[in-house]
Amino acid sequence: EGKKEHRVGFFSGCVMSVVFPSVNEATLNVLAKNGCEVVTPARQRCCGALHVHNGELEIARELARTNIDAFEEADVEFVISNAGGCGATLKEYPELLRGDPRYATRAERFSEKVMDVSEFLSGIDLNKSLGRIEARATYQDPCHLAHVRKIRDQPRALIRTIPGVELVEMKEPDRCCGSAGSYWFTNNDLSMKLLDSKMTSIAATKADVILTANPPCLMHLRLGAARAGMEAKVAHVIELLDWAYQAPK
């Protein structure tokens, strides 16, 4: 919409595209609102995160090569991810493909383009035509986003940009919610204990919107809210921003 400022590639992700398509739609809407031509390469595949976690490195390398090819063909300035875990893995392609004569240098160039959507939006002149949302919100730091990518302030800055939204910090917002990729079904007992502790911290904020930025966290926090009988809505930060663009001034 409006003047085109950037041509960006969108990494749609496996879980996000299947379980949370509304988050991907919100991401596309918000990027378009901010002068972006968005390209979603059809050839892209899984980022390879779960393969890396499980030691299946050769499969992960093949996925990485395919993704590098796909986004090079798309000829984009940035590769935007809305999933903390995916973004962390995409950033690690140079390590994964170190020593590969065809892809090592290309992996470095690809990695330099990868940005979390909150990181990207915080670095541009954000479209401020946001409507008002009356909400008390709290933010859960996804582990990959906070600890691997060191992206903590940018999602909070976007939340604070929205008129009417009060951001209330929970206790230990960057402590794992218990999801941790596949951990919640391989180590379910401890995962549930971590989740219950997290929901206690969230309840203390009296928030009616629980925000995060990674699909496993979204799934786990929704489970936690249901288990705790909480009526708070669990959403991705980019969804809240999209709702604000659609809300009346």
Image: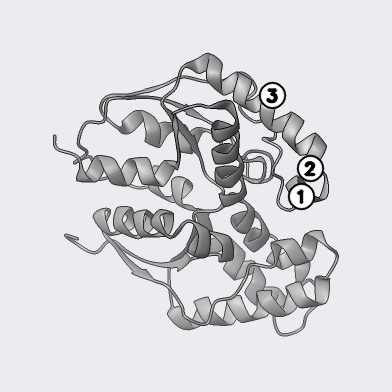
| Mark sitting earlier along the chain (1/3) | 1
Q: Which residue is mark 2?
A: 188
Position of 210 compared to 162: left or right?
right
The answer to which quarter of the image holds residue 156 is top left
Image mark for residue 197: 3
Q: Is residue 168 left or right of residue 66?
A: left
Coordinates of residue 31 in the picture (x, y in percent): 33, 56
Q: Count numbered badges in the picture.
A: 3
Q: Which residue is mark 1?
A: 185
Tag 2: residue type?
Asn
Q: Are marks 2 and 1 in contact (CB under 8 Å)?
A: yes
Q: Residue at x 76, y 50 (%)?
A: 185
What whole-number distance in Å separates the C-alpha atoms at marks 3 and 2? 14 Å
Q: Position of residue 186 (x, y in %)?
A: 82, 50
User: Which of pointers 1 and 3 indicates the residue nearer the eye?
Assistant: 1
**Whether residue 151 can be seen here:** no
In the rendered image, residue 148, in percent from the top left (x then y), is placed at 69, 45
**Which residue is painted at 13% across and 34% down in the image?**
249
Q: How is the image coloured?
A: one colour
Q: What amino acid is found at the position of numbered circle 3 in the picture?
A: Ser
- Helix, strand or loop under label 1: helix
